[in-house]
Amino acid sequence: MRKLALSDEILLKIDKPARYIGGEVNSVMKDKNVAIRFCMCFPDVYEIGMSHLGIQILYDMFNRRDDIWCERVYSPWPDLDHVMRERKIPLFALESQDPVREFDFLGITIQYEMCYTNILQVLELSGIPLEAKDRTADHPFVIGGGPCTYNPEPLAEFFDLFYIGEGETQYFRLMDLYKEWKGSGRTREAFLREAAQIPGIYVPSLYEVSYREDGTLAAMEPRCPEAPQKVSKQIVMDVTDTYYPERPVVPYVKATQDRGVLEIQRGCIRGCRFCQAGMLYRPTRERDLDMLKKKAYALLKNTGYEEISLSSLSSSDYSQLGELVHFLIDEFGSKGINISLPSLRIDAFSLDVMSKVQDIKKSSLTFAPEAGSQRLRDVINKGLTEEVILSGAGQAFEGGWSRVKLYFMLGLPTETEEDMKGIAHLAEKISERYYEVPKERRNGKCQIVVSTSFFVPKPFTPFQWAQMCTKEEFLHRAYVVNHEIKEQKNKKSIKYNWHEADVTVLEGVLARGDRRVAAVIRRAYEKGCLFDSWGEYFRNELWQEAFAECGVDPDFYTVRERAEDERFPWDFIDIGVTKKFLLKEWHKARGEQVTVNCRQGCSGCGAAVYGGGVCHEH
């Protein structure tokens, strides 16, 4: 029987001890004497990490091999963090309860910028030196993956390697290289040099970075012949005949996403200019309908979940969505299984489907117009007109819905006060549409929730050249929207929420930063910053102190519009989509020109180089 790393005394004292004991349904146990022990980490609390599909896919993929045992670890919540430091208890993996430091690899998925200090928490509690240059043969190799690795530079000194792209393609090649190296007596750097020759593997220590007098990046050059000038994104072109878990690990405590997940496609055809995922995951690749049907059966049978969710950047664009949804309703609806359909475009088909799978009295519909005016929606290439929005809302209200959520962004390039006020005006028009429905067919009072986030110009988007607003500018824009909503006739039907401006500014620095930002991350962590994505723990004043102490000006990374010929810290990564295309889209945005989606016509973004997906449908 396993011996738990935490005593009963500690487990009884901390919040949700089930986060730390392992042994969940479908978790994998193996002999400790396997050739490679890989610890997969999500640097946030257990409930968030257990909702992440990517880790479930890699966990299943690694554990199919007899010579690899993949286990999991998550960030200890502050109550346990305090106990572990006080009693010098090393961070441990859930399955074996062994210290993370004893593994061959620590693989950290980096899904959002506000988890960066948690990465340092995981390293320190594990007894692994924070900086890669201080690690020896006694330490695991620390490898990062996930969307934030498309600008890995702010984290470069903390990682031995980064995996750029989808893990199903090159990870086994890396594992085989490690097995061969492990018994060879060669140095740690020798392994890293050989690993750098595998497509998609980036080894930061093998590159030299220099800066110009104005602070911009001058050059980033390989220090050895093994390191390539460009690191190419790795993607799976056949997303049907590939790894997908039929027995995902089921958590003991309620996770954020407490349901089975069917990923129906990867990528998005839409080309919204603010959306990083839409560019990173091109080209769009669909999973086969028969494969999804089989996986749905297996998922529900092996987990006991009572809900299944269809995962995709834009579910409505999956070409066989109708057949899949009707299959799920016919097969599982009578068995009490709920079907969740996020990322739908609101049209007659979607509303018909949702009326079959949702309790209309309890649920709300979500629209994401992103901008308050048609002009600004054209700037961001949203591909959504006011007519379509009002028509969809009208059909929804006539179908029995009364609650609508609207998502917008503030601070988008070229935004004017008229655009900001347009958010309130659009919400008012939607509420007016509700009262056009005959009273006897209305379902209670109309409720419209308007939420605004603040815009961050992310790497590998057409807006990567754009400047960000300051905290004060963001808050002023939220004030304009709030004031205008209060001026509307149906203001009692409209509720307004907005995101924290200081968190957004920091996210912008971390998303767009270079290697000099690493010192700030470390200093903020040393000052006590942790769980920065959790409002109750975010300490902006400590971050500002860290910037000042490290001599780093956050405004340099945020409020400055980038020159068109500026070299970005992430330019060494090749994602298929070309910088030339992104720049063309930046010009079209400022000219308020729309680009059609990938199924209407090819815009020549460069993703056709992968030889498949939507690029080759016709």
Image (cartoon, rainbow, N blue to C red):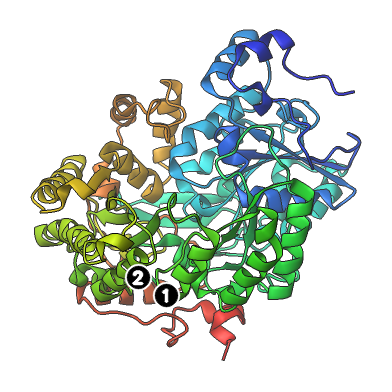
Identify the residue under disc 2. Answer: 395
Note whether 179 is above or below 291 in the view shown. Answer: above
Residue 290 or residue 48, whichever sits in front = 290
Query: Which residue appears at 53% of the width and 68% of the height?
Result: 267
Kindly check if marks 1 and 2 are in contact, taking CB atoms under 8 A apart as contact.
Answer: yes
The residue furthest bottom is: 618
Q: Is 86 in front, or is 129? A: 86
Where on the picture, by quarter, is residue 551?
Answer: top left
Residue at (57% x, 67% y) in the render? 266
How far across and down, in percent of the image, does residue 471 sit? 21, 41
- Residue matched to label 1: 348
Question: Which numbered dot is residue 492?
Answer: none
Q: Quadrant for the C terminus, please.
A: bottom right
Q: Position of residue 456 (x, y in %)?
A: 32, 52
- Residue shown at 69% from the left, 49% from the top: 56
Q: Amino acid at mark 2?
A: Gln
Q: Which badge, 1 or 2, is on the more N-terminal residue? A: 1
